[in-house]
DNA sequence: TATACATTTAGAAATTTATCTAAATGTATA
DNA sequence: TATACATTTAGATAAATTTCTAAATGTATA
């Protein structure tokens, strides 16, 4: 779970859409999958890539597994982008 | 040249190192390639991916082709990240 | 405890990506 | 203009990624 995995996770359109969905609140894997036209197994794979990238966290609640955004990693990526842009060139 | 291509370009370690190099000023393709242990052709491919992602621009100066950072795309990515993080949660 | 439901995991196929070598292109110069 | 230099493009191969179906796991409930 590092920078590489985080950016890799963000580089896929489906996974970015998942992140956008989670902005509005935590969701179960099933509810997330319902937003896409791929199988639940495929969405589950994407969720695991997002988890490896530290962009989401999951918790089980009975039958359901809830996913939520983890924004701490986002800060790290923003810091790199700001550095890249250059403090002087603002 | 859109969001997708920009993030895909950034998701590779070699390409991020190229971006980091260019922070310190414009460089020729050859000078960039010299920093890596892969062939010039491979580095040239990475440069073309970065160009497609709008992260660098190139200009020919005689025999040489200079590459430079293009930071306008970076702003767009930061805007998405800020949005993702949520204005309320700051 | 048997069954159903929510979700993940395994394994395979198709697509994309990274990398290489060899050839092509563009520019400068002897 | 022939040659050399800087770089890209083409075509091939290997590795990684996306996606699927089928099977496994974990939890709740009749």
Image (tube, coloured by chain):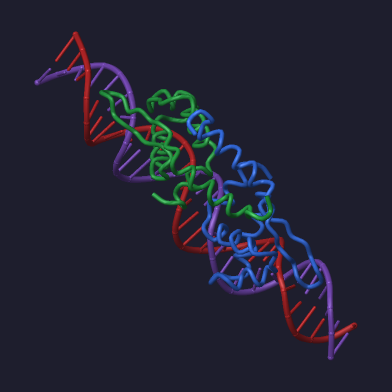
Chain colours: A green, B blue, C purple, D red
B90 sits left or right of C22 in the view: left
Quadrant hosting residue A27: top left
Percent of width and height locating residue A81: 57, 50
Percent of width and height locating residue C5: 30, 18
Q: Residue, x 63% and y 60% (percent of image)?
A: B23
Q: Residue, x 55% and y 39% (percent of image)?
A: B81
C8 sits left or right of A86 in the view: left
Percent of width and height locating residue B6: 62, 47
- Residue B30 in the image: above or below residue C29: above
Quadrant hosting residue A72: top left
Q: Count of labels shown?
A: 0
- Residue C11 in the image: above or below residue A32: below
Of residues B51 and B18, the one drawn nearer to the viewer in this rendering: B18
Of residues A46 and B25, the one drawn nearer to the viewer in this rendering: B25
User: Residue pushed farthest front?
Assistant: A88
Percent of width and height locating residue C2: 14, 19
A24 sits left or right of B2 in the view: left
Of residues A47 and B41, the one drawn nearer to the viewer in this rendering: A47
Q: Residue, x 70% and y 60% (percent of image)?
A: B68
- Residue D9 in the image: above or below residue C12: below
């Amino acid at each position: 779970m590092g920078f590489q995995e985080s950016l890799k996770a963000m580089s896929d359109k489906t996974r970015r859409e998942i992140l956008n969905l989670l902005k509005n609140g935590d969701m179960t894997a099933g509810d997330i999958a319902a937003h896409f036209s791929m199988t639940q197994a495929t969405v589950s794979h994407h969720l695991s890539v997002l988890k490896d990238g530290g962009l989401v966290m999951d918790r089980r609640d009975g039958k359901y597994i809830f996913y939520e955004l983890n924004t701490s990693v986002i800060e790290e990526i923003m810091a790199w982008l700001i550095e890249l842009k250059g403090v002087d060139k603002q």
